[in-house]
Image (spheres, rainbow, N blue to C red):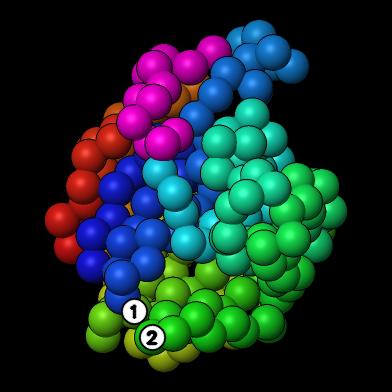
Amino acid sequence: MKITWLGQAGLLLEACSKKMIIDPYLSDSVEKIEPHNKRRVAVDRRFLQIKPDIIVLTHNHLDHTDPETLQHYLSEDSEVLVLASANAWQTVRKFGGIKNNYVQFNSGTEWTEGELRFQAVHAEHSDECAVGVVIYAEGKVCYVTGDTLYHPAVFEQLPQRIDYVFLPVNGRGNNMNFADGKRFCERLGATAVPLHCGLFDALDLHDFAYEPKIVPEFYQEITL
């Protein structure tokens, strides 16, 4: 399995001969609406040339479901499986394309694609349909929380074993801060990959005081 951080909460996963993109934000869309949220790290346009097999959209906020980014991956000619929580599904299915498969991926839904399995789980966020996703691939169990706060309901659907958890710790926009992110990881007992920092703020992920953790770098492979 190969995983690359695309910045913010975006991930590129390559496993089981499939390319999967989760919550890609590779534009300046947010700045156009919120000028204070200006990108601190330029877009690496190499990642706009990818032809993904699967796209996962955890919720319908612009830095997770971004039409300016998604237009590079979805067209009348593309053949992509799109797993999107209800509000994001309403946005992304407008791209059309008869070969694209737009699946409403709400909490509790599971989808098997070849040797991959995806499980949507609850996320506590300001998009009431937001989900996290548990991915079973190549013997590993990876949990991408999506944007979420610490809440007991988040843990109810999770499997007993989680190897790696990818979580927001920026403490803004209804996300956990460093302290609650640490408590979250301690409850799971998984290796943490903290996200959602460094693009719109000056937070340093090395300051996230939980071990074991892997601190990702923009556009670089995350060595699990």
Residue lying furthest left in this view? 223
Classify residue 199 as left or right of residue 92.
left
Residue identifier under label 1: 137
Please provide the residue range marked out in magenta.
38-49
Q: Say which mark, if any, is on residue 115.
A: 2
Q: Secondary structure at mark 1?
A: strand
Q: Which residue reaches farthest top?
A: 35
* Residue 158 drawn in magenta: no
The prevailing secondary structure element of the residues shown in magenta is loop
Q: CA distance from mark 1 to mark 2?
A: 7 Å
- Image quarter hosting the C terminus: bottom left
User: Hey, which quadrant is residue 1 in on the image?
Assistant: bottom left
Left or right, 179 with respect to 61, comes to left
- Amino acid tagged 2: Glu
Looking at the picture, does residue 51 appear above or below residue 17? above
Label 1 Cα neighbours within 10 Å, binned few <14 / some 14-19 / many ≥20: some
Q: Residue 22, percent across and down?
A: 50, 54
- Which quadrant holds residue 109? bottom right
